[in-house]
Image (cartoon, grey):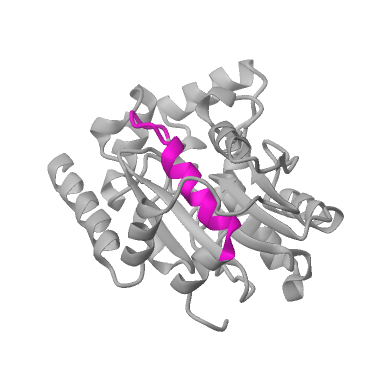
Amino acid sequence: MSAALDHETRRLYESLRSSPRHGPFIRAVEQAPRRPRTPIRDTVLAIGPAALYKEFRRSGADGRRLREAAEGLGLPVDTIPLKPAGTLTENGAIILKWLRTHREKNIVLVSLSKGGADIKKALAMDSGFESFHRVSAWISVGGLMDGTPLAQWLLSKERIPSALRAVNRMAGVDLTFLREVDRRSGGPLDFDLTLPAHLRLVHVLGFSLQAHACNWLARAFHRRLAAYGPNDGFMLLGDCQRWPGLIYPLWGADHYFRTREDLRPVLERLLTMAVEPSRLDPFFDPGP
């Protein structure tokens, strides 16, 4: 199973890199400068953090590395105050309120994991996309657009999930929010991701093998998802082929973008392209 899954994961990664849709964009990112050509004005980077980003900061769920890369470019950064264990509807409403009350002419959204699902819900809640008219780009890192099969298992009565929930309860952390990212027919995320025509979406996805897992729990998650095909230790990578937008795959990174490599150059190049719309526009088809 492991060798076959590794082969399938590498094949999907290479197919994205060589595809006529995503390949030119991937090469453009790799060749892009690490700094904008002109000073960034009236722009803010808005981070939509992952679930439990206050409780587990060390995981990278709060977007710290993205914030550091953005601040290094002189880009103002703000974190949308999502509820760490909030429902999609609760956090969707917070996102819409945040967008309506910020006056910058250009907003670049960056989301992590469930933060991507929260933005997907906010888009669905905003008929006419009026709150998104100043959002030019969205970088989704490991976005749970369709949820994860892990949700049902992590809420099950099996030994490992039961022990995880017990440990987290003692720490004051409730994992029932996982119902919001249950990848099942009729589940909370069982609807299409729809974007306004002007919004440029980039999915940044980690393509990891079990050998890349950073700890025993990550390895357990990867094994649990192996039957479904390529995964980043939390979500199914094959789902991305249905999503609108462009894909930047990163070999060896897990769901929270943890990797042995220095990610700052990649993050700076992605942010530089996102804050200069003319760099992204050529890779998107015209019209809705």
Start and end of the magenta stretch?
Answer: 258-277
- Residue extending farthest to the left is 3
Dividing the picture into quadrants, the one containing residue 263 is top left
Task: Report the quarter where the N terminus lies.
Answer: top left
Residue 145 screen position, x and y as percent = 52, 57
Q: Name the residue located 73 percent from the left edge and 43 percent from the top edge.
A: 80
Asked if residue 265 lies in the magenta stretch, the reply is yes
Dividing the picture into quadrants, the one containing residue 77 is top right
Q: Name the residue located 55 percent from the left edge and 37 percent from the top edge.
A: 69
Q: How many marks?
A: 0
Task: Report the quarter where the C terminus lies.
Answer: bottom right
Residue 55 screen position, x and y as percent = 63, 24
Residue 11 screen position, x and y as percent = 20, 56
Q: Is 177 located above or below residue 60 in the figure?
A: below
Q: Residue 82 or 175: which is nearer the viewer?
A: 82
Q: Residue 265 or 159: which is nearer the viewer?
A: 265
Residue 103 screen position, x and y as percent = 84, 56
